[in-house]
Each structure stands twice: as structure tokens, then as C-alpha cells.
Amino acid sequence: MGYLDQMVKSRHKTPFQLAGFLRVCPRPLVAVTELVDGLERFFPGGRLCHFGADEEETSRADLLVSWLHRDFGRVAALARRTGQPVLLAEDAFLKSVLTVARPGPQRYKSNMAIFFDDMGYHFSAARPSRLEVLLNNVDLGPEETRRGAAIREKLVRNRLSKYNHQPPLEGSLGRSGKKKVLVVDQSFGDASVPNALASALTFQLMLKVALKENPEADIIVKKHPDSIARGDRRRRTSYFQGLKAEGRVIPVNVEADPYSVIEQVDAVYTVSSQMGLEALMAGKQVHVFGLPAYAGWGLTIDHLKCSRRTRTRTLDELVFIIYVLYSHYASENGYPLTAEEAIERLIILRGEYWAVQ
């Protein structure tokens, strides 16, 4: 049994609560595999150190945080010897205004929202994550469901996503009066693709299925904003890189906020992109070819199945669990934020950024 499997087994009923940890250890030394900008907000009384840079310091850390999926083995090896608690961390779905790859002031790239998980990475379908356990087991009342609905409506109305610098799409997509289907491209090499049990071949299959199932529709292929920011000149940056407009296939390789694209289409095909979740929130039919965290709960048309995901969820339950129960938010000054407060802060930051462009 691997260390992550042991974490899953031992912590299924006793989750590691970050807020509780900080109450007990208000000034922690936290060893992190990647010193991501903004991470310090979530440990306002503590200090971050780079995991492994100083072995003695790392061994004294009150908490180990694995940021990148590929780093978990090193973290697990130490924790196995020392018994230090471990969290797996990843950008949450309301991260910042700018992508890391895009030039701009650091305050617009700094991380406002993070997933901390004591069981697994939310994007990895191979093992359960804390998010999956929550979706399978938490019972919600009417108040929580209403709050989920209000958050969903505010996200869609304000067109908020993981990155929020992109302007609304100008003009119309495809041919007037024709059905339109969105096929979502992703950053090449993104860990969320293989961990969703998908590959480059999955993207080709998805495009073929979209064409076959929608013989009269325009097929809109949207490029990921990270891929646009990095450009195509030196290396492969996306799975549909080099795709040309041909027949009913229309590539969209310009920056545009996801909702301004989603609102023009009738259905969305994705492998594991967050855009699939946003399309659900916008009321679209979503076909999923990988196993992202939002698939398998009765809301999406799934081409893969996960036997662990046994519960049917409403959309507003899904939103509440992801954006309220699972996500952590913090202000620039290190104060914890609610989901609603984080949304308001992100709207303000985006407005500031747009004002100077």
C-alpha cells in the first residue's frame, strides 16, 4: 500500500482541517515543494520554506505541502519516516486575474484561492480526493443549496473563472442560424489530462465524436489561455495546436472570457477542463471524455465511469461543495475569505486591471 493510499484509508473519517491546524499551530513552519505566489496568505502567522532546500529545516516543519503532482513522492518519503502531516495543494477555480504565463503586475497573478486536500489531488481519478468524499457523503440542507445557487448565479453573471483578464468575445461564432458545439482544448502536458485518465488521443476522439454526433453543427475549438499566452513557436502548448479552419471546424485562438464563448453554443465537449463545469453552471449540455472532479454525479454525459462516485448531485449542491466546502480563500493581507467575499474581491481586482489596459 502506497503512502497516499494510507492517507486515504486513515483520513476518510477524520479529515485534516486547515483552520483547525492553524488554531493549534498559529505560527507554523510549512515546507512547500513550490513557493507559489500567494500561498503565504493561507499561513499568515507562519513561515514558508522550500521543501528539501535545507533538510534539517524541512524535517522540523509543522506541515508538508506538495504543490505539484510529480513532487508527492518526495514528500511522502519524508512523511513516512517522520510522521509529519501532509497536504496536497492546487490552484482553486477562482485563482486570480492573470495567468502566470501572462506579463503583468504580480498582484494580479497572486493566488487568492487554493484547494488543500489531505487525501489526493482533486483532478486525479486514480484515487479518491477529499472533494470526492464530500460529494459522495455530505448531506446539504435548503440553506446550503440556496447559497450554492446564489454563488452559481453570481459567477455566471459576472463571468468569473480561474483566470479573469480575458475580455468578452467580440462578434458571433460560426454560421448564423446553425447549431454550435464547443470543443475545449487544454494546455499540453497539464497534469489534469493524464490524471483524468485521458491522453492526446482522447482529444482526437472527442473531436471525431463531436463531428459525428452533430452533423449539421459548427464545431468551435477553443484554445486554452495559457497556450495563447505562451505562443506556439517553440514547443507544443495545446492538444489541438496547429488545427486549421476546415469545413465545420472553427478554431478560436484569441483570448476571450469562457462565458462569452459558452453562451453562443448549444453543447460543450471537454476532456477535463474547468470550462466544462462553467458550461454546466451556464445551463449547457456537457459531454466529458475524461474524469474531472465534476463528472460522474449525474450532471454530465460521461464517456468514462468512476465506480467510486455513487451519488447523484444537483448542480447547486455541486457548486456549494466545490466553492464553499472544498475551496480556501484568503485576502492579500492573509485574512480568510468566504466564497462570496472572494468573488467580490476578484471583481474589484479585475476592474482595476482592465482600467489600466
Image (cartoon, rainbow, N blue to C red):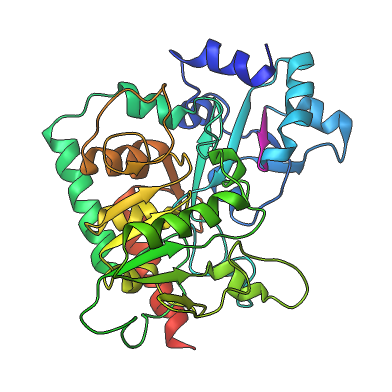
Nearest to the observer: residue 347 or residue 246: 246
* Type of secondary structure dominating the magenta stretch: strand
* Residue found at x 32% / y 37%: 321
Which image quadrant for residue 67?
top right
Q: Quadrant of the N terminus?
A: top right
Residue 94 appears in the rendering = no
Residue 118 pos. (x, y %): 54, 26
- In the rendered view, would you say 52 is above or below 94? above
Residue 238 pos. (x, y %): 62, 64
* Residue found at x 79% / y 23%: 78
Q: Is residue 167 left or right of residue 90?
A: left
* Residue found at x 46% / y 42%: 292
Which residue range is magenta in the image? 63-68
- 66 drawn magenta: yes
Nearest to the observer: residue 345 or residue 320: 320
* Residue found at x 51% / y 50%: 334
